[in-house]
Image (tube, rainbow, N blue to C red):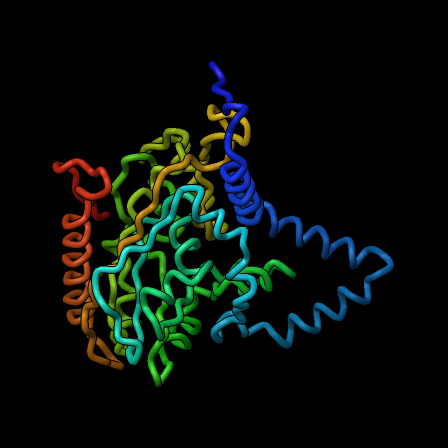
Amino acid sequence: MKVEFAPINVPLKRRIQTVAVLQWIFSFLLLAEFCWGFFVLLILGNFWFLAVLYLLWLYLDWETPCAGGRRSQWVRSWTVWKYFREYFPIHLIKTSDLNPNQNYLLGFHPHGVLVAGAFGNFCTGANFKNLFPGLTPYLHIMPIWFGCPFFREYIMSAGMVSASKESVSYVLNNEGGGHASVIVIGGAEESLNAHPGSLTLNILKRKGFIKMALKHGAHLVPVFSFGENELFKQVANPKGSWLRNVQEKLQKIMGFALPLFHARGVFQYSFGLIPYRQPIHTVVGSPIPVKRNLNPTREEIDQLHTLYLQKLRQLFEEHKRNYGIPEHKSLIFE
């Protein structure tokens, strides 16, 4: 394989952007393991009493990820996130006003490999606040991450909360409105489809978010992130292949998927785990009004789910030409 190296005279700003993305990759892939290792060292070392104090804190604070989390505007405003967003770059596109007196459930599509668009738009900077004043976004992620010592504090500071039913209910129960639950509908399973050019969404059997919206009267908002699947390449894993079967079994056991992805490196463009510089345009659609229904029937859930799919497809079709999607390409729902 011929290795393509980066030019020597790359502007300093671009180097800083690459370092910003590198630390994000480290945080996403290795920081949790590093935190566990540090915690074990505390227990086994002379500072075991600090580990005991933290365990006490963990016990007292266990429910916080399901009760709105504990965000830090300081962490969300770190300069490193500015360079992170500029690397791709990441853009948030508004198509309609969202009333701050209402609560919303934003369905984010597609998952991609590492959900860069969702993190960049809803966990960093003030772009969302500027476009949708009065709304506070909460990005829901798998509950397993909030059991990791120290790491849980970091991800909560960025505005992430648990994806449990209790957590979503807490966010959407805000009486004064102004809350926006952001849920990556396809989940970990969808990351296995995150190949460049892929438009396959795992959504046909995912109706829990519809039921939550009905029970809380939260308006539904489809969100499509163009470019999300272009950031990495994956080892070929078509359905039915031995690799895909292993990945799906591991996903069922562990709760999260293990896509075998690759892209570029720091000083060369041929291999590595740093994503390609591909623009991400996250388009926020128009809200779908939802009336509160504490006990929705299966028919009512199915009806709203069908409407949501229609609005999601419409959003995609209206904007695909702007972001390089061929006219003949359309979303595939599975």
Residue at the image point whose x is 32% and y is 42% from the top: 227
Which residue is pictured at 43% across the width and 46% down the height?
A: 86
Q: Position of residue 24 (x, y in %)?
A: 53, 47
Q: Outermost residue toward the top?
A: 2
Looking at this view, name the residue that lies furthest to the right: 46
Residue located 43% across and 74% down the image: 166
Q: In this view, does 323 lie to the left or right of 112?
A: left
- Residue drawn where x is 19% and y is 61% of the image: 308
**Image spot of residue 17 (x, y percent):** 50, 42
109 relative to 50 in the view: left or right: left
Q: Where in the figure is residue 332, as x and y percent of width and height?
A: 20, 44
Foreground pick, 172 / 58: 172
* Front one among 14 and 240: 14
Count of numbered tags: 0
Residue lying furthest bottom: 175
Q: Answer left or right for 29 relative to 309.
A: right
Q: In the picture shown, does residue 282 fall above or below 198?
A: below
Above-or-below relation of 24 to 140: above
Residue 103 image-quadrant placement: bottom left
Find residue 141 and report its horizontal and vertical position in percent.
45, 59
